[in-house]
Amino acid sequence: MSKSKTTQGVIGIDEVGRGPLAGPVTLCAVYLENEEMVKSDIFQNIIRDSKKISKPSRYNIYSIIRENRYLKSRIIYAIASRSAEHIDKYGINKSVSQCIRSCVNELRKKGIPINELKINLDAGLVVPIKELKQESFIKGDEKYTEIALASILAKETRDSYMKKLSKKHPEYFWDKNVGYATKKHREMIKKYGITKYHRKLYLKAFELFDKAE
């Protein structure tokens, strides 16, 4: 893995939930004031793609940032989601774009000088505000601390939400698959039909659209 990098006063953005059959897409923008946070033993060697680190390590990072524990410098973040209904209506790309805009505007409201900073994004993501300095990176969540942290915060936020929904709809096992198209999830859709949390557009690819009508 490449050594994590960051620059003073930088923003990182990443997304989770682009591909699931159910639940929202979630974006996070993270502002790092400087590198002091990265030097902490708490974060050393575990800042990387949130999908590759262990669940306990990922949750530990998430908790530390949310509770502002042990941190040597400011980490300010914003999170935005768009629902399955929104994705069905506007499409995934527009939904993601709206989330990015919401996150950037929220950081601006929190006093972050957005126009003066560089925004680093994971590959394929673009901030829909042309005047802002930005760059996307392939496997950015494995290379840049600010993107890795955005990935972790977004994933923990979305996973937590799906686990709560699973209590309402336990038949779909969202506490385990968090909405993705696992074999069990698809079988349960065929058996029980769908909920308002399912993405009708996505069900076409799995020949489940008849269940969405």
Image: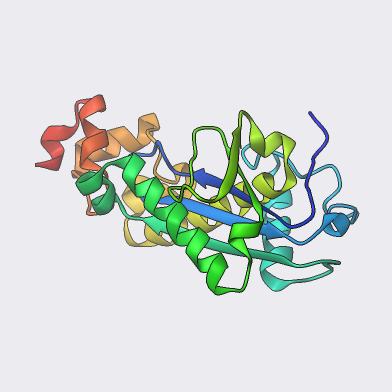
Q: Position of residue 75 (x, y in %)?
A: 72, 64
Locate residue 94 relative to residue 132 in the image: left or right. left
Identify the residue shown where x is 23% and y is 34%.
203
Identify the residue shown where x is 50% and y is 60%.
103
Locate residue 133 relative to residue 37 in the image: left or right. left
Q: Position of residue 105 (x, y in %)?
A: 48, 64
Can residue 162 be seen here? The reply is: no
Locate residue 84 relative to residue 56 in the image: left or right. left
**For the image shown, how many numbered marks are present on the structure?**
0
Q: Is residue 86 above or below residue 67?
A: above
Q: Position of residue 98 (x, y in %)?
A: 38, 53
> How is the model colour-coded?
rainbow
Question: Between residues 36 and 57, which one lies in front from this camera angle?
Answer: 36
Quadrant of the rendering where the N terminus is positioned = top right
Identify the residue shown where x is 32% and y is 56%.
169
Locate residue 92 relative to residue 9 in the image: left or right. left
Q: Is residue 114 above or below residue 185?
A: below
Q: Position of residue 134 (x, y in %)?
A: 59, 43
Q: Residue furthest front?
A: 131
Identify the residue shown where x is 55% and y is 33%.
123
Which of the 4 image quarters holds residue 156?
Answer: bottom right
Can residue 187 be seen here? The reply is: yes
Which of the 4 image quarters holds residue 77?
Answer: bottom right
Q: Is residue 103 above or below residue 69?
A: above
Question: Between residues 197 and 133, which one lies in front from this camera angle?
Answer: 133
Which of the 4 image quarters holds residue 3?
Answer: top right
Quadrant of the rendering where the C terminus is positioned = top left
